[in-house]
């Protein structure tokens, strides 16, 4: 089964029809057959961005449920340490906590395809094993 990692930007764009990336993200995600995975850090970040919209939080919850999005925990002490090390390593890019958790999840799942709008970051970041993530939206 194909596995894609899901970043905050596309998740928010999918939920907001006024977002300039909405059409491309919606077409990509609606056509996808496989498993979407993300981290709790991405969900928290997305909830922050959609909170201002009247039905934003509910739309996010509905999407998570309807899509079968698998959400992986990223806040255990060892995970925090690994994420902090990545954030420090990529401080000049920069990398935020949610990005770091996705890079770590890529290694955990051996999944390198990521749905992200962050071209600069995810073209620079490497997994702990030195693998490059492949930006799905660049291929559609």
Image (cartoon, rainbow, N blue to C red):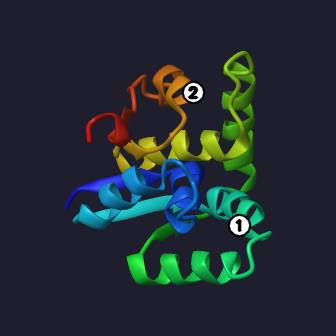
In the picture of the structure, the residue carrying the numbered disc 2 is 121
**94 is higher (above) or lower (below) than 67:** above
SS at circle 1:
helix
Quarter occupied by the N terminus: bottom left
Q: Is residue 115 left or right of residue 118?
A: left
**34 is higher (above) or lower (below) than 78:** below
Q: Is residue 63 visible?
A: yes
Q: 13 or 7, which lies in front?
A: 13
Q: 70 or 60, which lies in front?
A: 60
Direction front: furthest residue:
18
User: At x 49% / y 62%, what residue is drawn?
Assistant: 14
Q: Position of residue 6 (x, y in %)?
A: 47, 54
**108 is higher (above) or lower (below) than 134:** below
User: At x 47% / y 23%, what residue is drawn?
Assistant: 123
Q: Position of residue 137 (x, y in %)?
A: 36, 41
In the rendering, which numbered label is found on residue 50?
A: 1
Quarter occupied by the C terminus: top left
User: At x 58% / y 49%, what residue is drawn?
Assistant: 9
Q: Position of residue 55 (x, y in %)?
A: 68, 82
Q: Is residue 112 visible?
A: no
């Amino acid at each position: 089964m194909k596995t894609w990692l899901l970043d905050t930007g596309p998740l928010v764009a999918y939920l907001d029809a006024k977002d300039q990336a909405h059409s491309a993200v919606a077409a990509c995600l609606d056509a996808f057959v496989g498993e979407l995975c993300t981290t709790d850090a991405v969900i928290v970040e997305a909830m922050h961005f959609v909170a201002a919209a009247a039905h934003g939080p509910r739309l996010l919850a509905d999407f998570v449920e309807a899509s079968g999005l698998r959400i992986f925990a990223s806040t255990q002490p060892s995970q925090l340490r690994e994420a902090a090390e990545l954030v420090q390593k990529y401080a000049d890019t920069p990398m935020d906590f949610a990005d770091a958790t996705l890079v770590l999840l890529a290694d955990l799942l051996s999944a390198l395809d990521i749905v992200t709008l962050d071209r600069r970051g995810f073209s620079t970041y490497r997994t702990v094993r030195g693998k490059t993530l492949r930006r799905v939206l660049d291929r559609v």
